[in-house]
Image (spheres, rainbow, N blue to C red):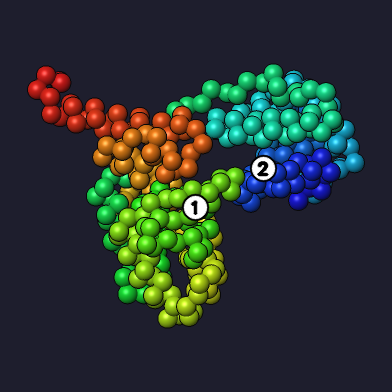
Amino acid sequence: MLTLPLIARFINYLEAERNFSPHTVRSYVADLVQFCQFLSVDGTNVLPDAANLPAPDQLDVAVLGDRIRAVTPMGVRAYLAMLRNTDYSKSTVARKLATLRSFYKFLVRQGELVSSPVAVIRTPRQDKRLPTCLDVEQVDKLLGVPDAHSFLGTRDRAILETIYSAGLRVSEVVGLDLDDLDEFGEALRIRGKGKKERLAPLGGKAIEAIAVYLEVQSQHFGRHRQGPVFVNRSGQRLTDRSVRRMIEKYALTAGIVQHVSPHALRHSFATHMLNAGADLRSVQEMLGHRSLSTTQIYTHLTTTRLKEVYDKAHPLAG
């Protein structure tokens, strides 16, 4: 990791004051390291290519602090141009710009700069992408794949049921501890983005799947009242990557052609809830979205579904 005091202070601020998750902090670090790689190249004559930037361990930390402070709006635009020329998606470019915006805001508050060079840069317009969503039949097929008689099978079935039942992010499901389970209240205590807590309702099938898994787990590792809910063969907490690979494997087995991620199950939860008549505010609360506008993307999916039903059912639709 690049040991630069300005960046180290910013990362400490994200962790200690903003309570950002380790995954989010790693993204910020990666974006800032790439920006430092860009600043280390003399791009006055030829715009550098992102693929040919110097390695992080080759950067001159002694001069980078001054270069960060000396950045102008034109320099930021040159960096964004490099990203676009290297075929980064609009969403990735927007995320990297958001990282710089937060970083330079922090430097202004710290008195390192009078103004931010990013303040005058507008975020590029994003293409509206609808999230991947499975239909109910596909979800049923996926949930039915894991072996109901093995430790890994009962664990994986419980994970799939929990994500779909409560609309969890993958980081939230792997972060579940045993004392987060409220079996009597049929809910989970979730620590979401920014370590904000919420209660997520849990359906009967998910509760049953978790109970079966915990019984099998106790036969392998003994009964525990604390620690992670979902563990690997060694009894250690599962990682996000393990869950992603597991879901991809089961999706292929279920014959689902489209790419299925943990987030696809979360999207499916939200879409199916709205299709069944749930109001947007309730779905926002269950998903843990800070803004209603984030949840509104699912209305595009439900509107598409309503249009399909209309076109098929109305005698004059066509």
- In the rendered image, which quarter is residue 36 located in? top right
> Gap in Å between the C-alphas at discs 1 and 2?
18 Å
Vertical placement of 200 versus 124: above or below?
A: below
Residue 29 image offset from top left, x and y in percent? 70, 44
Vertical placement of 4 versus 160: above or below?
A: above
- Residue drawn 49% across and 66% down? 178
Q: Residue furthest left?
A: 315
Q: Earlier in the sequence, mark 1 or mark 2?
A: 2
Observer-nearest of 198 and 4:
198
Q: How many marks?
A: 2
Which of the numbered marks, if any, corresponds to residue 68? none
The C terminus - image quarter: top left
Q: Amino acid at mark 2?
A: Arg
Q: Amino acid at mark 1?
A: Ile
- In the rendered image, which quarter is residue 315 located in? top left
- Circle 2 sits on which residue? 18
In-image side of 304 versus 116 (left or right):
left
- Residue drawn 30% across and 59% down? 204
- Circle 1 sits on which residue? 190
Q: Check disc 2 and report its element: helix, strand or loop.
A: loop
- Residue drawn 28% across and 45% down? 135
> Is disc 1 in contact with disc 2, using a CB cutoff of under 8 Å?
no
- Residue drawn 33% across and 39% down? 271
Residue 282 image offset from top left, x and y in percent? 38, 39
Observer-nearest of 8 and 212:
212
| Mark 2 Cα shell of 10 Å, populated few (<14), some (14-19), many (≥20) | few
Q: Residue furthest front?
A: 184
Residue 241 image offset from top left, x and y in percent? 52, 57
Residue 192 visible to the viewer:
yes
